[in-house]
Amino acid sequence: MGPVIRIEVDGVGVDVPDGSSLLPALRAAGIGLPMLCSDDRLSPVGSCRTCLVRSDGRLVAACVTPAAPGSRVETASDDLKELRREAVEVIVSALPPRALAPGNPSELAHLCLSMGIGPETAAGSGGREIDESHPYVHLDRDLCIACGRCVRMCSEVQGTFALTLVSRGADTAVAPGTGGPWAESDCVSCGGCVDTCPTGAITEPGAGRGITTGVDPDGVTRTTCGYCGVGCSLDVVVRNAKVAAVLPARDGPVNRGHACVKGRFAHGYLSSPDRLTHPLLRRGELLEPVDWDTAVRHVADRLSGAVAKGGPDTVAAISSARATNEENYLFQKFMRTVIGTNNIDNCSRLCHAPSAAGLVASFGLSGGTDSFDEVEQADCLLVVGANPVEAHPVVGARLFQRALRGAKLIVADPRAVGLALQADVHLRPRPGTNVALFHGLAHVLITEELVDEQFLRDRASGLPELTDLVADYPPERVADITGVPTSDLISAARMYGRAERPAIVYGLGVTEHLHGTDGVRSLANLAILRGAVGTECGFGVNPLRGQNNVQGASDMGALPDLLPGYGKVTDPAVRARAEAVWSMPIPASPGLRIPEMFEAARSGTLHALWVMGEDVCATDPDTENVVRALDACPFVVCSELFLSETAKHADVVLPAATWLEKDGTFVNFDRRFQRVRPAVRAPGEARSDFDAVHAVSTAMGGDLACATPADALAECAMMAPLFAGLSHARLDREGAVAWPCPDPHGPGTTKLYRDRFATPDGLAHLAAVPYLPPGEEPDADYPLILVTGRSWAHYNSGSMTRRGGNLGLDAVNHLDIHPDDAVRHGVRDGQPVTVESRHGRARLVARIGSSTSPGEVFCTFHFPTSGVNRLTSGHVDTITSCPEYKVTAVRVTDSADE
């Protein structure tokens, strides 16, 4: 805590942090004042004049007046009370009577009620425009008091700058900066304006402002968001047993009262008529509803039969990053102790498996090196292969605000989107050339002596080998390989090399390549060269996880070669520790990875597959081969919310609960365990995956113990030293705890490797890996390179976000194409096009712009019917089998020509 000063408030001495305004002092003294233009998340402006006090004899607004040592502040005199009342009455007088109508739940209405200001004071005539164009944000300009809170929220927290105040005098009101309807503005629907509006001028339709004041809710449940990997804390408001609203928690450790369109608004899928509410059993060509006993008995019999006929290794399971830690833990325990195989994998295989392998090889552990709170202190941010403004909006907003406050920003991304548009240096490498780019940066760092020689001597290995390797990657050669101008490469290297506290943040643009693990390792080299990991001289290397529990699914051992806590199944000591806890033997040989499971199914050696919470027909690459694998497998079980494309190929479909309907924990992108709590009941007979796995295990004669999710995490803590200090009870008390956490009474570890690295020799390992080309190259037949990724309005396969208002915000799967390529291939903006690769075809709608470079196109995978993953190849990372989603050679033709 910094220095404090003492002031006097109504005769009482109060200590406040130096540099504070008078407001914290008033709160410390237990004094509440009206503050209609103030929000603790925003800079103060003092425009409403409702927080008037007297400080050392001067009449001042408390929110904008600095607290000075020895100041004497007066708040309670009759004249001050009257001045504050008059300020509120002046504001109210311009509003229509409905602003203070009985039952109005707004902040202003509650304030007036407490001050005895009645509806008759509101004498405005109204009649200004109401904007109801947006599915989640409605604007009633008659209720706007021009406090500017929404405008500041949009600029200072979200960083979108989509709102402004228009007109003059009493007519001043908020409006979208683009001048048209709200739905056509630059708004990204974070909901910050709704949360901060004090009058009800900006509301969430159907929920209203009452949600923020707790008017007649059935309850409010604190949980963790189940969309991306940021791990936002949310307060779920329930009315009549249904979710009325989801609000960002002001005290959320990661989001700090902020959210994005998905976590804040995209919960309409909960009540979708498409929700599965009963188990389905295939009879002939049809999937027919059955009761749980019938479904479970059928699954148990078929799995037991597969084991009896072909052995346990003829059964495999795909676990889920959307499931809780406890569900992932139980599922992998079921596969290892009841089935008797290590054939368990999760969807991190498709995204961040190279992160785990690369970070372990470089540093020793599979998580990011620093907490995001520490990353946010960096004076130079190197953001690589990520578009957090869209894929991780809360993180993207915080990174952008850090750049606005003076941090240098380097972005390496083929596309000109998000943070790249604000970067000091934007590096646009050709897709698939990351390793060469990183070696070029390392070349400059070494040749210009922008390295920490003491750190390299004391805490790292491999410098001679790396120095020899990168000597072959001067800026000129790297420019030829990557297309990045030498001047930009040198500028970026110098900027990162001269920073006092640099940080690296990266995403799937680094990992989803044929040589993704090499990409992670060569990127980690930069932090090691700078001595910027495990020290106070920087904030390391930090992956942005794509789904809510990608980190946790792997932490819990839903991997074919690793047990909970990352112990190798081939290590006898690790197996012995697990066997002592489980009282069951564990197979010693690694199991199948997801691509190997599909290959085994197609070859006839896999007889049963259980897919939990993943639509592999939509999200996995080379869809046609995935479909052939499912059709070839004699028995397929699918646990799902909806009848997904994958579920349509299943023999049994088990209806699952969502993250808003279940109990457990998630681990976010910076290794924080946080609680997940049920806010509403799952519909019909839908059950949590935890309960479904238990039911099948019991029917097969197994005993998984762990009767509750809390029991499962407690048992995991017994097995894995990394998590030994974690429990539901502790998380309920403390909110969030980062692993490693070996001691129930000690803190979690936010910054790794302060004393030594977790490698066998305790050193960070530089990697001298050569650049190798991607798995696909363009040619005359397929002249364009396709990159796939995410958009701001949707999540993963879109199964949740397309069932609600988000579809109104982003209803079309576009193909982004450069104007030069559009001319070359005869493509018009808005034209339906067919995209063909060497593996399949997809149908998209062309969107011409400069976000992509010539020769490159981009689309998302949120609309399975478009067939995007029919295009992607079977090429996988040579070390981890992560698919090469980021490089596919394609051609584009007019759909009308077919």
Image (spheres, rainbow, N blue to C red):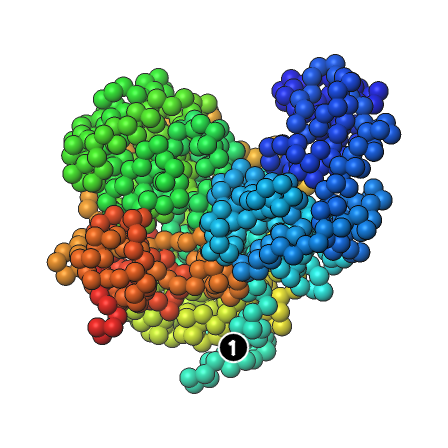
Q: Give the vertical position of 722 relative to 216 (above or below).
A: above
On the image, the x and y values in percent for residue 893 come to: 22, 66
Residue in the image at 26% along x and 67% along y: 834
Where residue 60 sits, quadrant-wise, is top right
Which residue does the image show at 81% across and 29% down from the upper left? 80
Residue 331, given in percent of the width and then of the height, sits at: 51, 59
- Callout 1: few (<14), some (14-19), or many (20+) C-alpha neighbours within 10 Å? many
Q: Is residue 870 left or right of residue 146?
A: left
Q: Is residue 713 visible?
A: no
Q: Nearer the viewer, residue 259 or 90?
A: 90
Q: Is residue 582 above or below residue 527?
A: below
What is the quadrant of the C terminus in the image?
A: bottom left
Residue 489, located in which quarter of the rendered image? top left
For the residue pair 1 and 331, the one nearer the viewer reads as 1
The residue wearing badge 1 is: 280
- Where residue 270 appears, as percent x and y from the top left, is 58, 65
Q: Which residue is at the front of the view, 870 or 39?
A: 39
